[in-house]
Amino acid sequence: MVMTEALPFASDALAGWLPFWKAAGFFLATFVLEDAAAVGAGLLLATGSISWPAAFTACFLGIWLGDAGLYALARFAGRQWFETSRFKKHAPRVARSEQWFRERGTLILIFSRAVPGTRLPTYLAAGFLRVPMARFLLVTGAAALVWTWLVLFLAQTFGAQITRWLAHYQAGSRWLLVSGILLLVVFQLIRRRLANFDARQFTTRLQRWMHWEFWPMWLFYPPVALYYLWLALKYRGAMLPTAANPGIFSGGIVGESKMKTLHDLMRASAEFTAEAELLAGGSVPDRLHSLREICARRKITYPFILKPDIGQRGAGIKLIRNEAQAVAYLQATGAPLLVQRFAAGPHEVGIFYYRFPHEPRGRIFAITEKIFPLVTGDGKSTIAELLWRDDRARFMAGKYLPRLGARQNAVLAQGETQPLVQAGNHAQGCIFRDGMHLNSPALEQRIDEISKNVSGFFIGRYDIRFASEEDLRNGRNFQIIELNGAAAEATSIYDARNTLWSAYRTLFQQWNLIFAIGAANRRRGCEPMTIAACWHAWRQYAALAATYPAAD
């Protein structure tokens, strides 16, 4: 009799503890995948299997303590390691980074909470750079509070429908098996990462996040995308930019032929254009024969440029110094290619120009001065070692080192230099500076005259090589190597001296001009490209770009 009475009592006791164990499980799960844990708690809220106080408290505390743990790890263990390692010589740079984070850290911490994938490096950087602990806990606590509530609310709101859809997967063994496999994969990935851990690369990657000019596109462009949507509503046309330049395919958004615009420039402004021609033939021998014929006919000698006819962000541009390099390039891709006479320069600028269709005269919106980085030998260090010691080059090591190949291990003599990039493109490692000091009435008039001779061109960027600043200001003795349409940027925004806000302000002004010119052309009868056609052009370009060799 005593036994039978005790069983219900024990069952009731266990049931009373069940909410606690559920909350504890979600608390611990946040240390593995915090957003997934919060979503899981929200799904239980939708079915009434856990209370709001238990779910919210467990998830919030787990997320907040996890953030604090990352901060503490970097502040105490990471900083102690740095101060006792050979990297201590970089202490002045770290001090500058600390000052930078003190000024902007609050916004960065808030922003990182809303962008999964940025939290780990941001919180580690905050700890390493000694952001005050009270400030860190207050900001991340407030952000975690709002984030946890939002995730739980959304998961609860839509969770009932999701749980009904998953009802036939209630067999726990399946989930257990899947979870086990995932944990094994994660463990193997972590172990492999630790085995190949490079402290120098890790430190550089952390510091790279503090320089917005190196942010990946998915992090930098969301505000621009939101502004684009606003302009699409304002001008009543999401594809209006494709009408900005009626004479260029898609207005220069995607898939346009470089050779077509160069042909127009060569026809009307030959003395200011580096001549080029599209290679004929489909096979490597046929295209090599075409290359030899073009070079002989146009008297183009080594070195010359080979590049894709359709390209963006400097992809695939190669300075060819001999026939062996030309053959290797032709073997690497079957995409349409053009050969272009090498404009020695040695200087290069990007000039962003615009003109409204109803206006008689255009204007220069921005000028980008391009600086080609190099390292200088000391007679004992390899090129790779010189690169890693450079204040800026180390941030682009992922671009430079593969391009250098085996040469990265060469030792440069005292005073000997090694260029790190040939293509005047920021994505390839070129340094950009605001070059509006090079502007002049004579230069603006010359660019305006050239632009009016390109049929259907109203806005875009010229890439120009020139010998001296005096020549450029006087509008003479320069060579246009490319003309890019509506998708081109006023690349002076990437000047490291610019603030993030000033960069966005310039891009917003640029896109407003593109939409306004597209709207003006629409009124004149030019129909914008459809979304489907633009998407098709993008897919074709992406397939081609995957075959392009690494740029110089």
Image: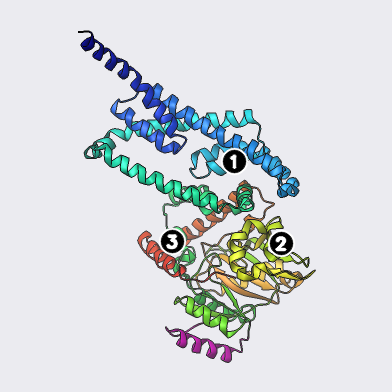
- The nearer-to-camera label among 1 and 3 is 1
Task: Report whether 1 appears left or right of 391.
Answer: left
Image coords of residue 447 (percent x, y): 63, 70
Residue wearing tag 3: 522
Q: Earlier in the sequence, mark 1 or mark 2?
A: 1
Foreground residue, 229 or 78? Answer: 78
Q: In this picture, is 488 found above or below 306?
A: above
User: Alpha-carbon distance for marks 1 and 3?
Assistant: 50 Å
Q: Position of residue 348 (x, y in %)?
A: 67, 69
Residue furthest to the top in view is 1
Query: Foreground: 391 or 541?
Result: 391
Q: In which quadrant is the N terminus drawn?
A: top left
The question of residue 237 being in magenta is answered with: no
Of the two numbered discs 1 and 3 on the same chain, state the one appearing first in sequence.
Answer: 1
Residue at (49%, 83%) from the top-left corner?
279
Find numbered disc 2 in the image and state the secondary structure of the residue it sits on.
helix
The amino acid at mark 3 is Arg
